[in-house]
Image (cartoon, rainbow, N blue to C red):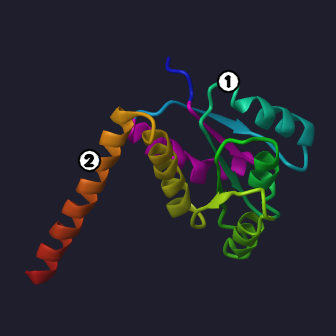
Amino acid sequence: MKKPLVSIIMGSDSDLPTMSETSAALDKFGIAYEVKILSAHRSPEKTATFAKGAKKRGIKVIIAGAGGAAHLAGVVASFTTLPVIGVPMDTKLDGMDSLLSIVQMPSGVPVATVAVGKAGAINAGILAAQIIGTSQAAISKKIESFKKELVKKVAVKNRKIKK
């Protein structure tokens, strides 16, 4: 089993259906990951310990999915120098509460924020792969192939429209 390079964390098991899209994206690029439930509010000490130790364990990127107050990504970012990507969950307020909670970070505590819900979860996996690809040629080549496939899919859609 390969050592995980990405930590996928979420505030609750209710976030798992969305965050499984992140796992699927990382699987496409052959990137090993771990999945954990952590809470900025219910288990803050455990969350801080996780964030402080992630780099020593070989983690390169942390992806944090959270809804509602959505403080998980910001709290984790405050305890690590690793890149943190926040995925806002689609909540009762159509994810706007989550989005604003994640994106409104104070100066000095950056969190990359992706779209709300499934699209964001997929993009978080792709963004993590791109970050890792800056230092791993094999992953970079997989990203390049993935991007070429996107171009081909658009061409196919254009041909269908013309018919």
User: Which residue is depicted at the point 29% across and 48% down?
Assistant: 144
Report how many numbered discs are placed on residues in the image. Answer: 2
Q: Magenta span has 117?
A: no
Element marked by disc 1: loop
User: Which residue is depicted at the point 85% across and 38% down?
Assistant: 48
Where does the magenta region start and end? Answer: 5-29
Q: Is residue 158 left or right of residue 14?
A: left
Type of amino acid at the residue the image marks with label 1: Arg
Q: Which residue is mark 2?
A: 145
In this rendering, the answer to whether 40 lies above or below 137 is below
CB under 8 Å between callouts 1 and 2? no
Type of amino acid at the residue the image marks with label 2: Ser
What whole-number distance in Å separates the C-alpha atoms at marks 1 and 2? 29 Å
Circle 2 packing at 10 Å, graded few (<14), some (14-19), many (20+), is: few
Q: Which residue is mark 1?
A: 57
User: Residue 59, position in %: x, y?
Assistant: 62, 32
Circle 1 packing at 10 Å, graded few (<14), some (14-19), many (20+), is: few
